[in-house]
């Protein structure tokens, strides 16, 4: 029998929606939800979130509104802590979910942060979905729809972490190989989530400036930023390449087979690895020194 979740009725917010989505993601994908404040209904539920005046994970009760609770969490953070404590979520994944989603949801719901109007975030997106209700009866189906959106975000964060973990050994080996070869370019045989593994291995001071990897029908070279969150580049592609495509770019480089260079000079695309290497060599960017 599916788990039965209860929460409050009426308009909904990102914390209770996220709490429900986390339960669906890591405990029971078929979990149902009842949205009522009726105490008899709440008592019958397996898990109660954001209503009921009780915080007791051992009983599946996750409310933060009562005076007796003085912590920083909303129902979302409470549920995530419980999922980690019970072994439903690995510690490294729980950390990723907190950093990328749940801590912000907690902070907004408890008034420590305020979303910026006109800049969509998960809290405002959930609120916008709630605004579609033109009657109380419409809140319930919209709640489930909002939970589906947040569930996709959770699954995406989990998938991203899995890709980074799978890429770690590959990226670190490629970093070592580039150093041993005296090359300024890291070579990856497949596309990988390289940024976090790269910077976790002291990438900011690593003696490489570019990463090469295959695209669907081409080869791409990306300029490495100086830090993981930066929009800059350690070294940019030549200014003469900026914004050019196909023959115009090939003519400037002097090598046929160039496809594209972004006007901000952080990515260049070539038909083959050999073309990419020849282009990079032509401007002294392939090898160090």
Image (cartoon, rainbow, N blue to C red):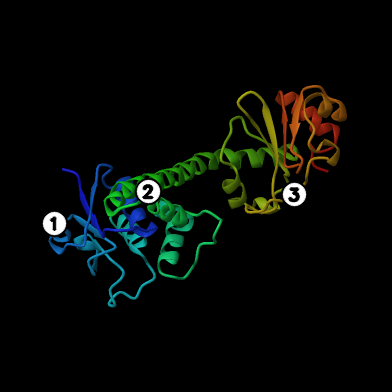
Label 2 or label 1, whichever lies nearer to me, is 2
Residue at image position (83%, 24%) is: 255
Q: Secondary structure at mark 1?
A: helix
**Between 226 and 111, the one nearer to me in the picture:** 111
Distance between the Cα atoms at labels 2 and 1?
24 Å
> Does residue 184 appear to the left or right of 196 in the view shown?
right
Distance between the Cα atoms at labels 1 and 3?
59 Å
**Between 20 and 271, the one nearer to me in the picture:** 20
Q: Secondary structure at mark 2?
A: helix
**Residue 77, percent from left and from top:** 37, 61
Of labels 2 and 1, earlier in sequence is 1
Label 1 or label 3, whichever lies nearer to me, is 1
Residue at image position (36%, 44%) is: 148
Query: Disc number at residue 146?
Result: 2
Q: Which residue is mark 1?
A: 44
> Does residue 57 appear to the left or right of 197 in the view shown?
left
Q: Which residue is mark 3?
A: 234
Query: Disc number at residue 20?
Result: none
Split into 4 quadrants, where in the image is the C terminus? top right
Marks 1,3: beta carbons within 8 A: no
Mark 3 crowdedness (10 Å alpha carbons): few <14, some 14-19, many ≥20: some
Q: Quadrant of residue 229?
A: bottom right
**Residue 15, percent from left and from top:** 37, 59
Label 3 or label 2, whichever lies nearer to me, is 2
């Amino acid at each position: 029998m599916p788990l039965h979740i209860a929460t409050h009725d009426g308009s909904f917010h990102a914390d209770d929606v996220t709490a429900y989505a986390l339960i669906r993601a890591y405990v029971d994908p078929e979990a149902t939800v009842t949205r009522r404040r009726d105490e008899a209904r709440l008592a019958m539920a397996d898990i109660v979130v954001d209503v009921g005046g009780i915080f007791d994970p051992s009983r599946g009760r996750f409310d933060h509104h009562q005076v007796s609770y003085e912590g920083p969490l909303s129902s979302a953070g409470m549920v995530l802590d419980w999922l980690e404590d019970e072994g439903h979520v690995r510690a490294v994944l729980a950390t990723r979910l907190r950093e990328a989603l749940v801590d912000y949801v907690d902070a907004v719901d408890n008034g420590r942060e305020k979303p910026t109007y006109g800049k969509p975030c998960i809290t405002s997106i959930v609120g916008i979905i709630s605004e579609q209700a033109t009657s109380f009866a419409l809140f319930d189906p919209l709640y489930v729809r909002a939970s589906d959106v947040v569930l996709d975000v959770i699954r995406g964060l989990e998938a991203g972490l899995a890709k980074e973990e799978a890429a770690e050994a590959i990226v670190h080996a490629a970093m070592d190989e580039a150093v041993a070869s005296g090359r300024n370019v890291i070579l990856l045989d497949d596309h990988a989530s390289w940024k976090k593994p790269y910077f976790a291995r002291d990438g900011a001071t690593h003696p490489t400036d570019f990463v090469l990897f295959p695209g669907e029908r081409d080869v791409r070279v990306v300029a490495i930023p100086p830090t993981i969150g930066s929009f800059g580049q350690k070294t940019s592609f030549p200014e003469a390449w900026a914004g050019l495509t196909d023959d115009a770019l090939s003519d400037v480089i002097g090598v046929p087979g160039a496809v594209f260079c972004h006007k901000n000079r952080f990515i260049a695309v070539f038909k083959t690895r050999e073309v990419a290497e020849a282009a990079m060599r032509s401007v002294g960017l392939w090898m160090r020194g």
